[in-house]
Image (cartoon, rainbow, N blue to C red):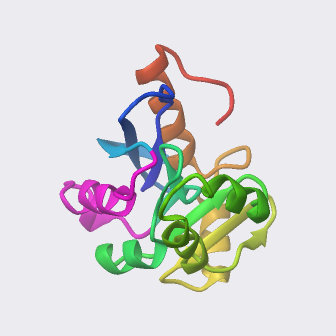
Amino acid sequence: MGFDDAPFAADAAQVDVAGVVCAGTRFEGMVWGQATRDGLDATAAITRLFTTSKFAAQVHLLLLDGLAVGGFNLVDLPALAAATGRPCAAVLRRPPDFPAVHRALQIFPDVDQRVGLIERAGAVHEAPPFFFQVAGEEPAVIAAALARLTDRGHVPEALRLAHLIGSAVRLGESGRRA
């Protein structure tokens, strides 16, 4: 099951989140919810979307398009894995620029808490073309799963579809960058 936030306006209080379920690379279904822009509820929002869905029993792995939802609403990756009972991986297109992220987080009064969430996500692993952080499973297992769950390009199909659907719902059409 892959989760991605939909495009949002800079002044939006809430951000839409799409969760797409795939069996391998075949679309099976989806869930839709919201999280607070720049809030601290991303972990709870994704946990709720997963645990209340009819798909929960068939899902073996949760994928996130990075750690952040709606700006800097950061997911607590180990807490998400514990709450769902599933391995969770934040998939990245390129290695993160941690110094730039830390500078950007300085605008938040709870900067230390947010930096802590990034640190809790652990090391960034590379398995070309993927970069990822993982909780609840060994990196080698996740690397193999990402390759198996990717039809074409550099994004597992569930994440690609979550991105395309979120863009289409919010903008009227899907974008090219998925």
Q: Position of residue 149 (x, y in %)?
A: 58, 57
Q: Is residue 104 left or right of residue 61?
A: right
Q: Residue at x 31, y 73 (%)?
A: 84
Q: Nearer the viewer, residue 88 or 149?
A: 88
Q: For residue 124, what is the image quadrant?
A: bottom right
Whether 136 is drawn above or below 169: the answer is below
Q: Residue at x 61, y 23 (%)?
A: 175
Which span of residues is magenta-colored? 38-61
Q: Position of residue 57 (x, y in %)?
A: 25, 67
Q: Look at the image and tell me in which quarter the C terminus lies.
A: top right
Whether 26 is drawn above or below 64: the answer is above
Q: Residue furthest bottom?
A: 138
Q: Is residue 70 left or right of residue 66?
A: left
Q: Nearer the viewer, residue 56 or 151?
A: 56
Whether 1 is drawn above or below 86: the answer is above
Q: Residue at x 71, y 57 (%)?
A: 103
Q: Residue at x 30, y 64 (%)?
A: 58
Q: Look at the image and tell me in which quarter the N terminus lies.
A: bottom left
Q: Position of residue 11 (x, y in %)?
A: 45, 27
Whether residue 55 is in magenta: the answer is: yes
Q: Position of residue 29 (x, y in %)?
A: 33, 43
Q: Nearer the viewer, residue 113 or 43?
A: 113
Whether residue 109 is in magenta: the answer is: no
Q: How many marks?
A: 0
